[in-house]
Amino acid sequence: MVIDEKMVEYVAKLSRIQLDSEQAAAMQSELGKILEYMEVLKTVDTESVEPMAYAFSLTNVVRHDVVSGHFDRDLLLENAPERTDEAFVVPKVVEA
């Protein structure tokens, strides 16, 4: 695929950028080099390579839940400006 001025204008429009003539010429050259490199990558043998989402394996490190001590509710609510027997009272932020 050859990158011409019309293609550069199209890509710039899709990208929502404005290029002057000097920048458009530079972009034409750069996009051409990218496509040339894609042709080189097409020659790489990938038949025995399994598809993957990441270049390295990911392991989810999750600890087991352990029951531990808790705070006294009355002690936590002690300094609240407004409270009920069980919770903080806060101003309403969502209109119904």
Image (cartoon, rainbow, N blue to C red):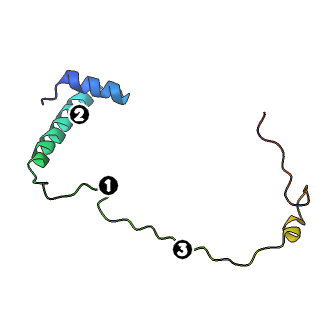
Query: Is 78 positioned to the left or the right of 63 in the image?
Result: right
Q: Earlier in the sequence, mark 2 or mark 3?
A: 2
Q: CA distance from mark 3 to mark 1?
A: 24 Å
Q: Secondary structure at mark 1?
A: loop
Specify the quadrant that holds the N terminus.
Answer: top left
Q: Using the rendered view, name the quadrant where residue 20 is placed.
A: top left
The residue to which callout 3 is attached is 63
Q: Residues within 10 Å of mark 3 (few under 14, many from 20)?
A: few
Image mark count: 3
Residue 21 seen? no
Query: Is 60 positioned to the left or the right of 23 in the image?
Result: right
Say which amino acid is labelled 2.
Met
Nearer the observer, 67 or 57: 67
Q: Are marks 2 and 3 in contact (CB under 8 Å)?
A: no
The residue to which callout 2 is attached is 27
Residue 41 seen? yes
Instruction: Write the residue at 88% across / 60% down.
Output: 80
The residue to which callout 1 is attached is 53
Tell me where residue 72 appears, x and y as whole percent.
84, 73
Query: Where is 36 relative to 66, above or below?
Result: above
Q: CA distance from mark 1 to mark 2?
A: 30 Å
Q: Earlier in the sequence, mark 1 or mark 2?
A: 2
Say which amino acid is labelled 1.
Ala
Instruction: Write the residue at 21% across / 21% down.
Output: 6
